[in-house]
Amino acid sequence: MENTIRSLQQEIIEFAIASTADLEAFRLKYTVRKGLIAALFGQLKSVDPADKPRMGA
């Protein structure tokens, strides 16, 4: 899970937004209800309770 978070964080940092179309693509991929960020929150349910503070939950 931690590797997934770091990988997604790096992907977001490297995402180039040069136009409104790029911004919309970013929004659709990451921030919508069924986007990648929301999927990570769904995975937090399976994280060991002792590890949750380290994961930000």
Image (cartoon, helix red, strand yellow):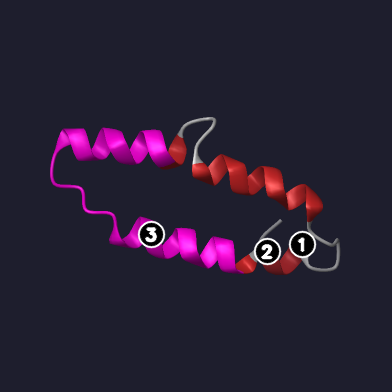
Mark 3 or 2: the one toward you: 3
- The residue positioned 37% from the left and 56% from the top of the image is 12
Q: What segment carries the magenta color? A: 3-29
Task: Give left or right: position of 5 versus 54.
Answer: left
C-alpha distance separating marks 2 and 1: 5 Å
Label pair 2/1, CB-CB below 8 angstroms: yes
Q: Any magenta on residue 22? A: yes
Q: Quadrant of the C terminus?
A: bottom right
- The residue positioned 13% from the left and 46% from the top of the image is 18
Q: For mark 2, give the secondary structure.
A: helix
User: Which mark, by number, is residue 52?
Assistant: 1
- The residue positioned 33% from the left and 41% from the top of the image is 26
Q: Quadrant of the N terminus?
A: bottom right
Residue linked to disc 2: 55
C-alpha distance separating marks 3 and 1: 23 Å
Task: Give left or right: position of 56 versus 38.
Answer: right
User: Relative to 15, does residue 18 appear above or below in the rendering?
Assistant: above
Q: For mark 1, give the secondary structure.
A: helix
- The residue positioned 53% from the left and 30% from the top of the image is 33
Residue linked to disc 3: 11
